[in-house]
Image: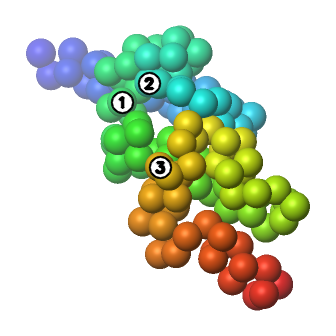
Amino acid sequence: EKSRACLCINNIEAYYAGIGEKLDSWVGMEEYTSPGLNIEELAGTLDTNRTYLAAYIKSTYHMSFREWIAGLRIEYAKRMLVQQPELTVSAISEASGFLSLSYFTKIFTDKEGCSPSKWRKNSSSAV
């Protein structure tokens, strides 16, 4: 029994390592900016199932799938706010994968402590 338990744990660790590599590659291609993305779609892309993927994200990043995706999108939006000052906050919200400007603004403000436009202004004056 004990050796079977070890084998299962080793298999899970190997499986998680595989998910991690695929996920890193997916993140590197900025696929998280795809609007309306859900965990089932991502699990299919990564050749896994939603349960394993959700468990992997929870154990690795200590957050839910939705929180993790929103965080990636906010970081993407922050880069765009600085690098592309000619774009409106609305255009950046859309390009980052948010379906609604109000949701983007709320999530951004919760995470950064100020609105995207104020964050942009503060960041550009700091440069």
> According to the image, label 2 marks what residue?
39
Q: Is residue 32 visible?
A: no
The answer to whether residue 120 is left or right of residue 35 is right
The answer to whether residue 57 is left or right of residue 33 is left
> Which amino acid type is marked by label 1?
Ala
What residue is rendered at 84% in x and 65% in y?
A: 85
Cα distance between the residues tagged 1 and 2: 8 Å
Give the SS element for disc 3. Answer: helix
> According to the image, label 3 marks what residue?
103
Q: Earlier in the sequence, mark 1 or mark 3?
A: 1
In front: 27, or 111?
A: 111
Give the SS element for disc 1. Answer: helix
How far from the left and from the top, in percent, is residue 110? 42, 65
* Disc ID at residue 54: 1
Image quadrant where one finds the C terminus: bottom right
Q: Neighbour class for label 1 at 10 Å: few (<14), some, many (≥20)?
A: some
Q: Mark 2 against mark 3, which lies toward the viewer? A: 3
Asked if the residue at tag 2 contacts the one at tag 1, i.e. Cβ–Cβ closer than 8 Å, the answer is: yes
> Which amino acid type is marked by label 2?
Ile
How far from the left and from the top, in percent, is residue 107? 46, 57
How far from the left and from the top, in percent, is residue 120? 71, 73
